[in-house]
Structures are given as C-alpha cells and as structure tokens.
C-alpha cells in the first residue's frame, strides 16, 4: 500500500515539476536560470542521500549473500552465468541501437544547424584504455572506493570479503550476522531516504524545464520520438528474453519494479533506483544472495539503455555531418563500445564521455555532441529506466537458473 502511495506521489511530483518549470520559463524567463539552480537542489540533496547509502548497502548485502552461498565454486558458477547474460544483453542493446538508427536515419532527416566542427562540447573524450579499466575495477583501498562510490570496486572487495567469511565456517558466522544486521539497518535507512523522492523528482524536472523550456522537445521531437521507440523495442526484446525463462511472470516483474522505474526515469539516475530495485526483486521472489550479487554487478556491466544510446547517438552525429560509415566500421564501433561501456559505472554523464571517445576514434567531429547536450536530460530519463529493466530481468533470470526464485509477494 505504502509503495503504491509513493509511486503516486512520484508521478504527481513529475507533473507538478513540469508545470512549475514551464510556468517559470514562459512567464518569468529572466528568473528561469536562478529558479532552475535553486529548485534543482532538491534533486541534488536526494541523489547525495542515495550515494550516501549505496556503498554500505552494496557491501553489506553482497557480503551476506556470498557468505550464504557457502563456497567459492557457487560464487564462480553464479558469476559466470551473470556475466554471460550481461554480455549477451549488451550485444543486443548495441546492435538494436545500430539497426534502429540506420532504419530511421534521424541525422539526415532533421536538417539541424550544425555546430562548427572545431567547437568544443565541454565533455572530456579521454578514451577508456585497458589500464584505465583495470584501475577503475580493482580497488587499492576499500575506504577510498566507498568514499568515491566506485560500485565495481566495492563489488570486487565484497566478493573477496564474503568468500573469506564463508571459508571461516562457524568462526565467521558472528561477523556475517553483524554485517546482516547492517544490511537490514541500511534497508530501513533507504525507506527514510525514499520519502524524499517525490520532492527530488519535482526539483529535477522543474529545473530542467525552467532552463530549457518544452520548445526544445518540439525541435528534437523526431529524434526523441525515434529514440524512445527504439527504447520501447529494447524493452520488448528484454522482456521476451526474460519470458523464455520466467514465463508470464516477467510481466509481474515489470509491475513490481514500476516504482524504481519511475524513480530512475524522473530523476534520470539509475543509481537513485538501486535500493528500491533490490527490495522489489526480493519481494518478487529472487533470493537475497542472488539479488545482492547480480544487481550491483549489473550496475557496472549491464547498462542496456546507456549502451543502446551510445550506438544511436554516435551514428546520429555521423549522419548529421554527412559522414558515411561502412558496415565494417559500424561493427568495429559496436565492439569498441562493447568494451568501453564497461568502464561507465560511476562516471558522471558516462554515456556522453564514451560517445566523445568513440567519435574521436572515427574522425567524427566531437562538436556534434552539442546537438544532444540540450536534450540529454530527457534522453537520460529513458536510458536510466531501461537500465533498471535490464538489470531486473537479469537478476530474475539468474535466480531462476540457480533454482533460487520463489513465488514472492504480489505486485
């Protein structure tokens, strides 16, 4: 009941936010920037609170989950199944983005005024090398990783810590019990933080609409419509794949994660939805040990919406500048994005950084990013919600493979 009320309040926050932002942009244009900066603080506070709880939540739930799995063989088996699904889902997302952008050709259809090829987008394009990826993956200090909210590094440390605790047998049990209490406390804290979500949603949308207005959606309507249609197709494919293993329960899964979905969509942040997604997956019937293992890994390796956007946006910019890429070059781009996108987790506006790096490798003007910066927030809403869908389906499927999927509560 409480969950339904929160969903309703988040939805109300979205509507009121758009209305307030539009009113300020239309009737008080001279104060729209100040209003946007001030009202956006609501979203900033909420996202900082979410970041505050993610590190201890991921650590405590993952350590307990691994310790309960019992042995390193089980952890390895679940890890291989999880990564296998992630790689498959990543390829589907990237390929679908490639197919849809070639089908619609939005860059050719829109006839936009192009920024000068030497204009700067302000996005650092530094390509993600193997060295960067390893540095981003393996922590030198768990305290440092937690301070910077490096989810992947926290996952690596938790894997070692949980496996070590399991290997201690009954000697390690008191420590695992303490960590389990910490995980319950963090879930309680999550409940308190979530009460602030409707205000955050109001602030995020009011700020964006006040600054940019809704006119920008009119200018980019074709591009946004085609991108969201592509996102809808990706949802359909992911749910269809999920139904091969979960049957009709996949629709119930979608119903149960509607609240974290709405939260990710309205705040344009997948991270904001993490605690609630974990809670709802357990209510759906995924075992705690599988959910707390697969979900944080998904946030590092399985950002389906972000990956689809990378191929879609990169080729859109190439089309806008009239640059033809051969099928071989497009496949090469797909493989490069397959690798570079795995370093996305924890990087602010990560999709844009990865796109900037890809553009430079194919001699496409990086200034093309300027075409997307104005609407990036609206596109990020769809990407973030899709990341939640992809990770929810992945967690449920791995739980099913492991025989750890109960019938759970009702959506």
Image (cartoon, rainbow, N blue to C red):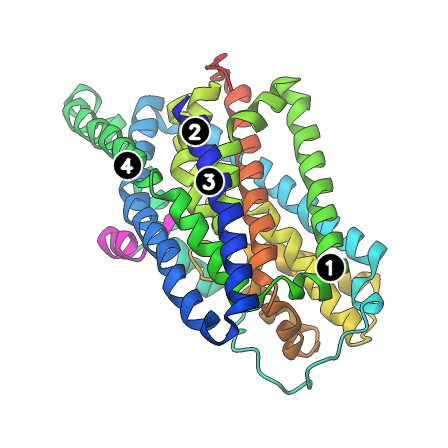
Identified at 35% across, 39% down, the residue is: 194
Q: Residues within 10 Å of mark 1 (few under 14, many from 20)?
A: few
Front-most of residues 175 and 371: 371
Q: Quadrant of residue 235?
A: top right
Residue identifier under label 3: 10
Residue 79 in the image: x percent, y percent? 47, 34
Q: Which quadrant of the rendered structure holds the N terminus? A: top left
Report if residue 148 lies within the magenta region.
yes
Above or below, comparing residue 78 to residue 404 in the picture: below
Residue identifier under label 1: 221
Q: Earlier in the sequence, mark 1 or mark 4?
A: 4
* Spatial separation of the CA atoms under disc 4 and disc 2: 14 Å
Residue range (magenta) = 140-151
Q: Residues within 10 Å of mark 4 (few under 14, many from 20)?
A: few
Residue 348 in the image: x percent, y percent? 45, 62
Identified at 59% across, 68% down, the residue is: 374
Report if residue 324 lies within the magenta region.
no
Q: Residues within 10 Å of mark 2 (few under 14, many from 20)?
A: few
Residue identifier under label 2: 5
* Spatial separation of the CA atoms under disc 3 and disc 2: 9 Å
Residue identifier under label 4: 192
Q: Earlier in the sequence, mark 3 or mark 4?
A: 3
């Amino acid at each position: 009941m409480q969950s339904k009320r929160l969903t309703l309040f988040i939805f109300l926050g979205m509507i009121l936010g758009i209305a307030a932002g539009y009113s300020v942009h239309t009737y008080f244009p001279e104060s729209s920037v100040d209003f946007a900066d001030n009202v956006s603080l609501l979203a900033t506070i909420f996202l900082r609170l979410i970041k505050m709880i993610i590190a201890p939540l991921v650590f405590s739930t993952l350590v307990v989950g691994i310790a309960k799995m019992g042995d390193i063989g089980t952890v390895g088996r679940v890890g291989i199944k999880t990564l296998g699904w992630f790689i498959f889902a990543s390829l589907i997302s990237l390929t679908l983005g490639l197919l849809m952008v070639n089908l619609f050709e939005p860059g050719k259809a829109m006839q936009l005024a192009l920024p000068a090829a030497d204009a700067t987008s302000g996005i650092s394009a530094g390509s993600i090398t193997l060295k960067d990826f390893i540095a981003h993956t393996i922590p030198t200090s768990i305290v440092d990783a937690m301070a910077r909210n490096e989810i992947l590094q926290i996952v690596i440390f938790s894997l070692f810590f949980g496996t070590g605790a399991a290997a201690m047998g009954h000697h390690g049990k008191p420590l695992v019990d303490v960590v389990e209490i910490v995980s319950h406390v963090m879930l309680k804290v999550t409940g308190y933080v979530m009460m602030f979500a409707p205000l955050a949603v109001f602030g995020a949308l009011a700020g964006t609409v006040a600054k940019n207005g809704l006119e920008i959606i009119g200018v980019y309507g074709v591009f946004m419509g085609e991108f969201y249609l592509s996102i809808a197709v990706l949802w359909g494919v992911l749910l269809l794949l999920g139904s091969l293993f979960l049957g009709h329960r996949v629709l119930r899964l979608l119903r149960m994660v509607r609240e974290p979905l709405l939260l990710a969509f309205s705040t344009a942040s997948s991270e904001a939805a993490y605690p609630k997604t974990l809670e709802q997956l357990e209510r759906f019937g995924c075992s705690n040990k599988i959910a707390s293992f697969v979900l944080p890994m998904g946030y590092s390796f399985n950002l389906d919406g972000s990956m689809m956007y990378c191929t879609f946006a990169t080729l859109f910019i190439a089309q806008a500048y009239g640059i033809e890429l051969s099928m071989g070059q497009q496949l090469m781009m797909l493989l490069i994005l397959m690798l570079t996108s795995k370093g996305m987790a924890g990087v602010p506006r990560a999709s844009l950084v990865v796109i900037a790096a890809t553009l430079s490798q194919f001699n496409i003007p990086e200034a093309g990013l300027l075409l997307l910066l104005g609407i990036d927030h609206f596109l990020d809403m769809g990407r973030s919600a899709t990341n939640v869908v992809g990770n929810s389906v992945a967690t449920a499927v791995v739980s099913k493979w492991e025989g750890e999927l109960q019938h759970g509560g009702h959506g």
